[in-house]
Image (spheres, rainbow, N blue to C red):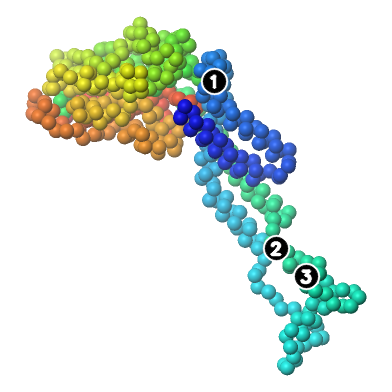
Amino acid sequence: MGFLVTILVTVVVVHYYLWRRLVRSTTLPGSRSRRWSTWALVALAALLPLTLVGGRAFGQGVGHVLAWPGYLWLAIMFYLFVFSLVLEIPRAIALLTVRRARRPSSATVAPVIVGSPVSAGGSAVAAAETAVQTGPGADADNGLAHPFDREPGPADREPGPDAAMIGRRLFISRTTAAAVGVGALATVGYGMRVAQGDPVIERVPVRLARLDPRMNGLRFAVVSDIHLGPLTGRGHTERIVRMINSLQADVVAIVGDLVDGTVAELGPLATPLRSLESRYGAYFVTGNHEYYTANGPQEWIDELGSLGVRSLRNERVEIRHAGAVLDLAGVNDLNGQVMGDGPDMAKALTGRDPGRPVVLLAHQPLQVEQAAEHGVDLQLSGHTHGGQMVPFNLLVPLQQPMVAGLAEVPRPATGAAADARGARPDVTQVYVTRGAGFWGPPVRVGAPPEITLLELRPS
């Protein structure tokens, strides 16, 4: 409920700001263009909450109809807001310059009274009275007039927005609004092309202190955040499977957020996963979105099992390669805690051989602190999308310890942490993939979709 209230408040505030900058400041009061633009913005604002709850409230049919226009407007709205904020200072400077150009000089010029010079011994007050009597407001009968009784002239009026001033301000506001609109639409168009194109293949070597030299070059294909849903089709999954198979990986790791719906709705979209190829199998751990589905994650765990993808539910398996052994563990997502199905690293890691390296699949990078306490060598995560749309990448660190790529986290140095060769690893490494899909808007800016090939090497 709190999340929904936050969304509603944000939608109202952002749309009100956009109305002031893109409608109110670019149209004349009472004009037809202002009325139509206002109502159009109100309708678009109402579309967003309907899109977010449409599937659950009105059924998946309605949800699918609302998805494309709703999420597309969400992206456009966001970048209209961003570009408007960026242009606030240039717009303010331009308006201030116009206002100062219209401001009259503060210097006053003394009236010259022709034919009535003030003598050296005369009074200045008499000269002022003469100026008033001969001014434009003098009474025709007696030649006298009070300054407050006369008709004010141009010099007496306070500076204000005359027609020329209004025209200049409209020009500045409309030019700014046009730049905002072009920038937002161009950015969203570019982001749609990136989001729906081929994921980038990131090849990353990772050195592990406890890795047996016989495992040198062991390859992990890592993919996360595929987000099968109303805006993706079967071709999205087929492309990802085809690209993973081309890597000839030893292990395939799907690190959560595979789906945004039930098996009944999205089962056919996941079927291509049956064709995944690897030497030692494909493995899956739940992400937060698996817990958002109407029927919970268990039906997807069963479905993936039928497709040949094994789910690691707070457990581990042994990967045997060239006579050496590596432990591959997986834990449930943190969001499972509210359903009594949360992560349990102790269960997944207790009792293992401390001389072996261990690779952990955990959807959220946030779990790396606990992984370090359990002596994990490498954690593979997703969840962040790399920010998905700049500048969201600047906000991710408020909730997660890293945005994307490879990082290290110090871990307690204990006697048990030393391996059989005497090496004492003092860090847990974590690789955060940007994910191969998108959530919400079908847009990625500054964070292209990714499939990662990790090659393990001994240090």
Horizontal relation, residue 237 to residue 38: left or right? left
Which quadrant of the view contains residue 411? Answer: top left
Q: Earlier in the sequence, mark 3 or mark 2?
A: 3
Determine contact: label 1, label 3, CB under 8 Å.
no
- Write down the residue under mark 3: 148
**Residue 54: image tag:** 1
Nearer to us of marks 3 and 2 is 3
Given residues 395 and 212, the one toward you in this image is 395
Horizontal relation, residue 221 to residue 170: left or right? left
Nearer to us of marks 1 and 3 is 3
Given residues 196 and 286, the one toward you in this image is 286
Q: Residues within 10 Å of mark 1 (few under 14, many from 20)?
A: many
Tell me the distance, in whole angstroms, between the alpha carbons under discs 1 and 3.
Answer: 66 Å
Given residues 449 and 51, the one toward you in this image is 51
Horizontal relation, residue 267 to residue 111: left or right? left
What number of labels is visible?
Answer: 3
Tell me the distance, in whole angstroms, between the alpha carbons under discs 3 and 2.
Answer: 15 Å
**Residue 158: image tag:** 2
Q: Earlier in the sequence, mark 1 or mark 3?
A: 1
The quadrant of the image that shows the C terminus is: top left
Horizontal relation, residue 373 to residue 263: left or right? left
Tell me the element at label 3.
loop
Q: Position of residue 148 (x, y in %)?
A: 78, 70
Tell me the element at label 2.
loop
Q: Earlier in the sequence, mark 1 or mark 2?
A: 1
Q: Position of residue 96 (x, y in %)?
A: 59, 56
